[in-house]
Structure formats: C-alpha cells, structure tokens
Image (cartoon, grey):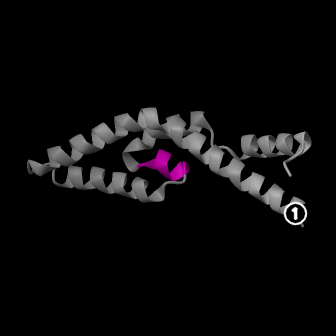
Amino acid sequence: MGLTTEEQILIEQRVTNGAKSPAAAYLLWFFVGWAGAHRFYLGRPGSAIAMLLLNVVGWLTFVFIIGFVFLAVFGIWWLVDLFLISGMIDAQKSELRNSLTQQALVSQNK
C-alpha cells in the first residue's frame, strides 16, 4: 500500500524544513572553506577534517617544497566543492525523504 497525497505532502514539507540551506553552504565554502566548514555543515565530518588537515599541513610545510603540493591539492578540492555542494544538499534531502517515507510506510503497516 502506498502513501496518501496528504502523507506525501507532509513528507515534502518536512524535507524542505529539514534541508540544509544552499546559501549558508556556499557562504561557508567561500569564507571558511579552508577549514572545511561547508562539509561540517553538510554532515560530512570525515572529509571536512581531511580538508582541514590538508590545509594546515600544507601551510606548516610551506617552507619545504612538499607544502606546495598539499596546498595545490587542497585548492583543487576547494574549487571542486563549489560544484559538489548542490549535489551534497540533494543527497541529504534524498536520504531524509527516504527515511521519512520508510517511517510512514512502517507506521501504516502497524
């Protein structure tokens, strides 16, 4: 048995209310992207910590040639994230929508 239109509307409202703000994510990316703040905000702490460490290690080893490599990798990653943020938000919305749909279907079968 499927969900009623009312249940589907309720799920979409909850997804909209629970979704991360694209504006906030892009502002975090621009102003504190060096710390991976946008990834923390989007619920990806592992890659956020990796991004932060890559940046810090790059600056600490900047005196040595290896620091340039770390900073170059970080810079490329930071720029790529500009295009990945919307996909991360969509994935988060999809996960939330699936979770809420599962909960609604389970409660129907009780």
Decide if residue 93 is on the left or right side of residue 10: left
Q: Where does the image place residue 49, in percent across and percent down from the top left?
A: 39, 58
Magenta-highlighted residues: 36-42
Residue 40 drawn at (x, y percent) = 50, 52
Considering the whole magenta stretch, tell me its main secondary structure: helix
At label 1, counting other C-alpha atoms closer than 10 Å, the crowd grade (few under 14, some 14-19, many 20 or more) is few
Residue at the spot 60% in from the left edge and 47% down from the top edge: 92
Going by the numbered disc 1, the residue's amino acid type is Asn
Farthest left residue in view: 65
Say above or below: 1 vs 30: below
In the displayed structure image, the side of residue 49 where residue 27 appears, left or right: right
- Extreme-front residue of the structure: 1
Residue 7 appears in the figure: yes
In this orientation, which residue lies closer to the viewer: 45 or 62?
45
> Is residue 11 found inside the magenta-colored segment of the image?
no
Q: In this picture, is 79 found above or below 10?
A: above
Count of numbered tags = 1
What residue did someone put label 1 on?
Answer: 109
From where the camera sits, is residue 30 visible? no
